[in-house]
Image: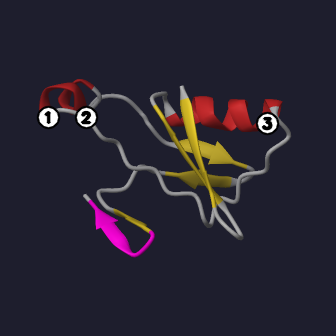
Amino acid sequence: MITTNMHADDNQLHTNCFPRDLVVWCAQRRLQLNANKTEVLLVGSKHNLTKLSNEDLSFTIGLETVQPLDAVRDLAVWLE
């Protein structure tokens, strides 16, 4: 399930998928991702995040590679 927050000049998507699946989902709907504005934060229990430690969770948008971050800003609030 994807939850969308729409703002005046951008959108936010909240979903439970691998980040590279999001690129496919957007392309199928003719939505363009901007690699310079795209941020990914993995949220989960410590146990589940540990399971992903050996996975390559980076993905490519055009020629840019996007890596998950330890913290992202959401409407002036930092999430870690």
- Which quarter of the rendering shows the N terminus? top right
How far is disc 1 from disc 3 in space, using C-alphas?
Answer: 31 Å
Q: Amino acid at mark 1?
A: Lys
User: Was residue 39 drawn as part of the magenta stretch in this picture?
Assistant: no
The colour scheme used to paint the residues is: secondary structure
Left or right of residue 72, residue 36 in this image: right
Q: Which residue is mark 1?
A: 46
What range of the chain is rendered magenta? 75-79
- 59 is higher (above) or lower (below) than 36: above
| Overall secondary structure of the magenta section | strand
Left or right of residue 58, residue 53 in this image: left
Who's the residue at 60% across and 29% down the image?
Answer: 21
Which residue occupies the foreground of this view, 80 or 5? Answer: 5
Q: Which residue is mark 2?
A: 44
Instruction: Tell me which corner region of the image, top left, top right, bottom left or bottom right, holds residue 78.
Output: bottom left
How far is disc 2 from disc 1 in space, using C-alphas?
Answer: 6 Å
How far is disc 2 from disc 3 in space, using C-alphas?
Answer: 26 Å
Mark 3 element type: helix
Mark 1 element type: helix
User: Was residue 76 drawn as part of the magenta stretch in this picture?
Assistant: yes
- Which quarter of the rendering shows the C terminus? bottom left
Q: Position of residue 65 (x, y in %)?
A: 58, 52
Q: Amino acid at mark 2?
A: Gly
Instruction: Tell me which corner region of the image, top left, top right, bottom left or bottom right, holds residue 43.
Output: top left
Who's the residue at 73% across and 38% down the image?
Answer: 26
Q: Which circle's residue, 1 or 3, is located before the other in the chain?
A: 3
Assess whether mark 3 and mark 1 are in contact (beta carbons under 8 angstroms).
no
> Please, which residue is most extreme toward the bottom here?
76
Q: Which residue is mark 3?
A: 27
Q: Position of residue 67 (x, y in %)?
A: 46, 51
Q: Amino acid at mark 3?
A: Ala
